[in-house]
Amino acid sequence: MTVLAFAEQRNGKMPKAAYEALSQGRRIADSMEDNLYVCLVGNNVSGLAEEIAACGGDEILMCDSEVFSSYQTETYAAVLTAAIRELEPGIVLMGYTSMGKDIAPRVAERIGAGLISDCTDMEVKGNEIYFIRPMYAGKVFTRVRVRTPVKICTLRPNNFRVDKKQGKGELRKFTAEVPEVRAKVTKIKVQESKRPELTEAEIIVSGGRGLGKAEGFRIVEEVADTLGAAVGASRAAVDAGWRPQQHQVGQTGKVVTPNLYVACGISGAVQHLAGMGSSRCIVAINKDPDANIMKMADISIEGDLYKILPELENQIREFKGRET
Amino acid sequence: MEEQYVEDLKKTIFEWTSKCRICMSCYTDCPLQLSTKGFLTQGPTGITKALYYGILWNTLEGKDAEDLREIVYNCTTCGGCVNRCKTSACGIEVIDVVETGRQFLIEKMIGPMSEQRSALESIYKYGNPYGEAPEKRLDWLEDAEVKRLPGDKAEVLFYVGCTTSYEPELHGLARSLVKLFKFLNLDFGVLEGEVCCGDPARSIGDEFLFEEMKTLNVEKFTAAGVKTIVTASPHCFNAFNKKYEELADKFEVVHYTEFLARRFEGKESFFEKELPYTITYHDPCYLGKHNDIYEAPRELIRKIQGATLVEMEMTGANSLCCGGGGGRMYAEMKEEQRLADMRVRQAQAVGADMITTACPWCHTMIQNAVRDLQLQDEIQVRDIAELLSESLGL
Amino acid sequence: MKIVVCIKQTFDSEASISLNETGGIDDQSVIQIVNPYDEYAVEEAIRLKEKYGGEVTVVTVGKENARKALHQCLAMGADHTLLVNDPQLEDADSHTYAVVLSTVLCTMDYDLILCGREAIDTSVSQVPSRLAERLDLPQINMVSHLEIVEGNVKATRDIEGGSEIVESALPAVISVQKGINEVRYPSLRLIMRAKKMAIKTFSLADLGLTMDDVAPYLSVEEYIFPEPRKEGMRLKGEVNEVVTQLIQHLRHEVKVL
């Protein structure tokens, strides 16, 4: 079975989800004893070939032109469709990112393929692949089979290991006919932040209603920054206007799977657990010992946030200082 | 052509609001006027006039609509202005105006405030405003002996209410009342499948949702076959007593403070355990201003050995609202407008180390304020029922 | 402006999930709601109508019970509603929905199609894009702000660490995200009134579709219930000691620091 991974990039940089798709693609290719093909679309992106090869890419179909300098659904979808039609892969992998969510279903419908979105695990059995993905906010998972010859799958970020394994790394120029763009990206606004993106972060420190007020997030941010973590928020905190919507973790926000999730003053409503319930380690800090989150956290601390968080920040600073 | 229902709402609002002669006496009794120096509501007159002109000029779109919503929904329906208007002016039932105004805004889909929306939806879906599972409503009840109506039969129904049932901080209140009722050898029980009294729906302006809850409750109370209903919350008490015409002849509805004051009359000697606190009592608006119950809670506090009752600057009929009534409980209030913060400062000023109250909402609001002001080590917030039960050694 | 909103009725987010005797997800004893993201789409459509005139039609694929969801949309201010209900849609996946919806939409006149970014039950985020592809329309997903500028649509689409401004001619398919608006509250009285309004209902045969046309691409082999997370270590006491214990544990046991 031929495996194709889509190497998502913006401005010549691949997000973590792209590396995860490559690595997972490599693992499947290995078990199928086949090549890992990679589709790379962009402008002046040949520099990425080395990194792609280091994650196992054998043959890289590169569509490199000014036309692709920014992501446009219609042009990128045309290239990916052309690549799939040429290679006829059994499986196509990419990240469940804003780009993956946008392009994958469009291409899937065009080529008549089943698409598994937000996949958290895969089982390869002979020539069949079973996909595991959550439903109902993670209250149940499904094992799904795709009936169509081409199977497309978007991977939930932070759920698939990134391995360094050298592939052949053959770079091949690829061209595809692209249509005129109707829905055109005319501007990209980037919010300057030194913190990692929520969905990619290894550590997330989140705040909720228990902080009492918007200014309460200052101490959450300080703890996050000493840890190099991202800052999240519960729906209550977002609805109260304390944090922007983009920072919301939960069913109506972002789904995250960090190694460490520190929930500060968050009660742990179902809707929040849906967004962070599969984090590897959950620490809850809350005044209420009966709060939901305290019952499912790996470590829970009962007490006053405004006393615990500054102390936490101090002690982290201390041991980080010792290490450097 | 608007529907008759909406036309009628407008007419009602007009009739009342056109009576106002802008004497502005009511300003002196508006807590929000006090805490925001008039920037928020322009006082009760501001609310009624905003409604009057909003409807008259039909400025009910865009920013105008948002402003009107702000003005009408910021009112905590404490009732201070109503009493003032009765005694010093033309007797406008300002709260009725506000509530009818909210009904009108809901019909126009201008109301409610966004945070109140989920409370209303949750009442409709689960029978409580907090999105909590109905089957968890009695989780607070540790005592397996307590009767569960209507399966069991009893004379007195303890109607717990949504906040007391679900808010962990208030489980002490619920459990204390159970202990006190048992101490009194009362034939009482709680309701299996209790639902919201509907008061939040009414005060936020969804009259039909209130009616729906009323129908449900009347059915449940009738099936339970009780004589007396004792409520933990003054809001449920007020709704049952004043807005449930169907209950009028069938049941006696009492707030627990009055109920206990009656039952414990002359039983001072039982309250043996000394609780050496300087206690101040915060009058809940729906007990005091709305129902003239000022003495019963104080009588109960005076029974407690070792406790000293001190009164705050604003007390009794002049009490300062905690900011949680009128559906405000579900909406965030900007920090500079938090009445509960002011209230805590008033308690501090008279040297109290404990604030007692007899309303789950006041309790929550004041407790939160104490926490925000980081005064946990200096001031405790307790419900009267908790103190009584502790003083009885229960 | 003629706007079509595609909605789905979903389980309430608090619903507990269990299987029925045939091994499928039990939908009998569950409170069902309009998918929250779709509510934003309906709200946005009504706001556009209020601003530019026109009409809003809400379309859904679902069972008889989905009428309740449509009543809510009518109470909010939608003008027409349409339900596709057919027992053969039991195993529908997002491809199936796209086929059915595109068939319905082919018979209609529209300037804009609005959807929610995903349904909170299956959370696959596929229908809007698949639908756009089938109708050969441009798509803009995850939109948190929308305006009409000289007959074109200008949308803000959320991406990692920022946003894109996307401009498109109409008609287009747009999926919306939380933050785009605040959904109005339809009072119980308005919902009761909406119950008396007409809902057009179609079966697959009415739409000229066969089982083959709507055959799903995916097949669910098994439902797996995750082990609930167990209560872990509880720390309480002196702040500095508790924090020291926490850090020790995170460094040496969990090894995340």
Image: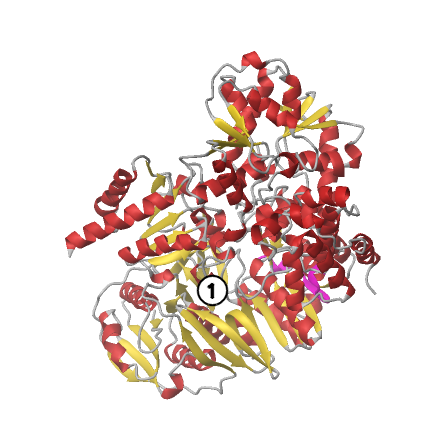
Please say if A136 is above or below C165.
Answer: above
Find residue B9 and report its image quarter. Answer: bottom right
Whether residue C29 appears in magenta in the rendering, the answer is no
Q: Nearer the viewer, residue B86 or A271?
A: B86
Q: Where residue A295 sits: x, y (%)?
A: 41, 39
- Stretch in magenta: C75-91
Q: Amino acid at mark 1?
A: Arg
Residue positioned 41% across, 60% down in the render: A119
Residue positioned 50% across, 34% down in the render: B350
Q: Nearer the viewer, residue A118 or B197?
A: B197
Q: Where residue A43 sits: x, y (%)?
A: 34, 84
Whether residue C89 appears in magenta in the rendering, the answer is yes
Please say if B55 is above or below B23.
Answer: below
Return the chain for callout 1.
A
The residue that mark 1 highlights is A147
Q: Nearer the viewer, residue A97 or A254?
A: A254
The quadrant of the picture occupied by the C terminus of chain A is: bottom left
Q: What crowding class fits label 1: few (fewer than 14 Cα within 10 Å), some (14-19), or many (20 or more)?
A: some
Q: Where residue A62 sits: x, y (%)?
A: 32, 82
Q: Nearer the viewer, residue C212 or A306?
A: A306
Is residue A207 found left or right of A58 in the rendered image?
right
Q: Where residue A260 sits: x, y (%)?
A: 32, 51
Scheme of image coloration: secondary structure
- Label 1: state its secondary structure: loop
Please say if C209 is above or below B48.
Answer: below
Residue A150, can we see it?
Answer: no
Is residue A272 found left or right of A220 in the rendered image?
right
The quadrant of the picture occupied by the N terminus of chain A is: bottom left
